[in-house]
């Protein structure tokens, strides 16, 4: 069975996290700039901190894994408490813990996909969408928030 599409997704995922890509930006490159202090800073009261965004990314990665592994309906919703965990709770674990969890979810998703073939991506999940749609949407979600992390970093470091 072919796994060319799966391998392409894995390559895109790896490049978004730590490799060369069209954006000339990746998570490792951006996150190495951030420290414990500026990770939890908010550029404004109504905006998220970098730590809150990273936590949000982690929660949606865990949700993706559950959907892929179990084929179950969505559990995490926009209004779910875990969708946006506040700084006050995230600070108890610390920035390094968030970074570790982000890397762990990266590894888990890649490991899961490495065991699949292209036919899996074409299989229907729920509501007529395919598993490939879930993977592509998740990658888009991560990249969207990578851009936000870059903007927030500039805002909090210029304000300091």
Image (tube, helix red, strand yellow):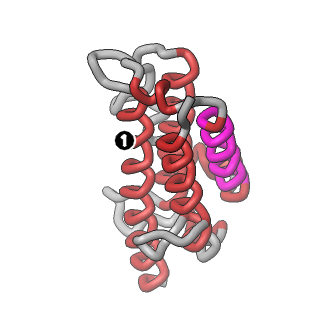
Q: Position of residue 87 (x, y in %)?
A: 53, 51
- Nearest the viewer among 76 and 28 is 28
User: In the figure, is residue 124 to the left or right of 7?
Assistant: left
Q: Position of residue 43 (x, y in %)?
A: 39, 69
Q: State which region is magenta.
A: 97-113
Look at the numbered disc 1 and give the secondary structure of its residue.
helix
Residue beneath the point at 49% across and 47% down: 9
- Nearest the viewer among 80 and 143 is 143
Q: Residue furthest front?
A: 1
User: In the figure, is residue 20 to the left or right of 143?
Assistant: right
Residue beneath the point at 52% across and 25% down: 68
Q: Position of residue 103 (x, y in %)?
A: 67, 51
Determine whether 123 is above or below 45 in the image: above
Query: Residue beneath label 1, please?
Result: 137
Determine whether 154 is above or below 128 in the image: below
Give residue 42's quadrant in the image.
bottom left
């Amino acid at each position: 069975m072919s796994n060319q599409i799966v391998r392409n997704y894995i390559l895109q995922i790896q490049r978004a996290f730590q490799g060369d890509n069209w954006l000339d930006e990746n998570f490792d490159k951006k996150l190495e700039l951030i420290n414990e202090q500026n990770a939890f800073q908010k550029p404004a009261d109504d905006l998220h901190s970098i730590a809150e965004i990273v936590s949000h990314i982690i929660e949606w990665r865990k949700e993706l894994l559950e959907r892929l592994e179990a084929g179950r309906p969505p559990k995490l919703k926009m209004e779910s408490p875990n969708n946006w965990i506040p700084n006050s709770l995230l600070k108890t674990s610390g920035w390094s813990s968030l970074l570790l969890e982000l890397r762990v979810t990266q590894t888990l998703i890649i490991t899961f996909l490495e065991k699949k073939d292209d036919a899996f991506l074409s299989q229907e999940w729920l509501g007529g969408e395919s598993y490939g749609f879930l993977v592509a949407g998740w990658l888009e979600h991560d990249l969207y928030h990578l851009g936000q992390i870059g903007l927030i970093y500039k805002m909090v470091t210029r304000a300091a």
